Image (cartoon, rainbow, N blue to C red):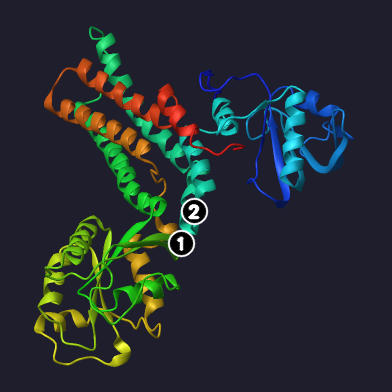
Amino acid sequence: MMARRVSFLYPTGDTIVAQATASGRAAVAMVRLSGPGVGTLLRGAVVPWRGESVRRLWLAEYRAEGEGVLDQVVAVYFKAPRSYTGEDVAELTCHGSPVIVDRLIRDCVARGARLAEPGEFTFRAFLNGKMDLCQAEAVRELVESQTWGQAIGAQRALRGSLKGRLEAVREKVVDVLVELESRIEFANEDLPVVEACELSVALEQVERELGGWIESYEKARLIREGVRVVLAGRPNVGKSSLFNRLLDEERAIVTSVPGTTRDCLREWVDFGGIRVCLIDTAGVRSTWEDVERLGVERAEREIEEADLVLFILDASLPAGSEDERGWRLIEDRPHVVVVNKIDKGWEEGQPPWVCELRDRAVKVSARTGEGIEKLKEIVSGLAVPGGPQEVESPAVTSLRQSVCVEHALDAVRTGRVGLRGGVSEEYVAEVLRGALSALGELVGETTSDEILRGIFSKFCIGK
């Protein structure tokens, strides 16, 4: 990959330093430096200096100017271009006292380094062609991942799963564009001509590929952002008890008084590598009491915005009009029917609409824990079928990437329709140039300054 000649976001050509591990006290901490002056800067500080033994760890003393030995460090030196940033890089692992880390970084600055800005190490890696923009975004997603599913998706993107297939797609578009431009340039020459239908077939293949990438975005979004799962049903069916059981903690107040839950409670939990936002809501029923009515209205809004609704029934009591009202509210939305309090037995006098739901309902007991693990598996399976491992590769993982692919897809589709409709070759060629521009923006080849600044400024310092 060619290095990119841009330097508007951060100053380049100097040496930067930052703590690469989390702040606070720890057993060890790492300080990272990158830039052309790393070797010179550390030669007098790290004793002994063994930078000639690149990519090998060695034990040394760090000697601060005017202070003597600051700490023992484990040092490693990476010579450009074989490093994370593509520049000379050193990593010093010291004891994790914030005082020591602060003094070490201050001494590096005194020797000529500059404090790194958020994301500057990864920006330099992007700048020097060590990764494309999709991979740079994946670095941040990996650092911020909170579930195994999020980590899997970020690692897949970091390995460049999108880049390889992007080149194949771009090559097909370029082939069509070359053919069209040859016709325009040599219109009076007797050259072999590829039929318009053949060119449109090639563009149709590109459409299918890009369409698959866009479809992958929704699954990747649910893994990255989490799935909103709303617990709904009439009062006293055990929503809050089930909420607590799924969280494995007493988060919601549980009483025998109907309508205890007035507001919506939200908590995040990991279901099989899928990050789930559980939302406990007020019981859905008609009420004239102002506070409870507001709670019911909020519950209905949450149901409208949910990725999945757990509709809860009480196994021990016959369903009534309030249950049916709640069911009609969610039946056309993605849902799971959950029959709670199964430990109390099944009330046989249920209305016909409940009997129809019984066979496909998940039977649980929030009190004893029966059926809870099965419910978790069903929720994660419905949210992301097959689990994080089955998300298509490549997966478009951010809104920015999705917009770029959509622009490319629209341009390719317009070009294909134009070819079949007999519009001018000049127009189709211009449209396909727009598709190539969108694909270039996807990986950062033609991305604006503002977008790059927005991406890298969200990184933590030291990455």
How many numbered badges does the structure rendering display? 2
Q: Secondary structure at mark 1?
A: loop
Place residue 260 in its image quadrant.
bottom left
Residue 460, quarter of picture: top right
- Which residue corresponds to the image point at 37% horizontal and 30% vertical from the top-left? 439
Q: Quadrant of residue 233?
A: bottom left
Where is 243 relative to 297, above or below? below
Image position of 198 (left or right of 129): left
**Residue of label 1:** 273
Query: In terms of depth relative to the viewer, which is nearer, 423 or 116?
Result: 116
Q: Residue at x 16, y 26 (%)?
A: 418
- Residue 326: x percent and y percent? 15, 70
Residue 57 visible in this rendered orientation of the protein:
no
**Earlier along the polypeptide chain: callout 1 or callout 2?**
2
Q: Is residue 384 above or below residue 116?
A: below
* Amino acid type of the residue tagged 2 in the rendering: Ile
Q: Secondary structure at mark 2?
A: helix
Residue toward you, 28 or 415: 28
The location of residue 182, given as percent across then percent down, is: 30, 15
**Rendered residue at 46%/62% (across/down):** 273
Residue 123 location (% of width, % of height): 55, 30
User: Crowding near pointer 1: few (<14 within 10 Å), some, many (20+)?
Assistant: some
Q: How far apart in space, not on screen, are marks 1 and 2 (Cα)?
A: 9 Å
On the rendered structure, is 446 left or right of 418? right
Residue 435 picture location, percent across and down = 31, 27
Q: Amino acid at mark 1?
A: Gly
Residue designated by label 2: 152
**Quadrant assignment for the N terminus:** top right
Assess whether mark 2 and mark 1 are in contact (beta carbons under 8 angstroms).
yes
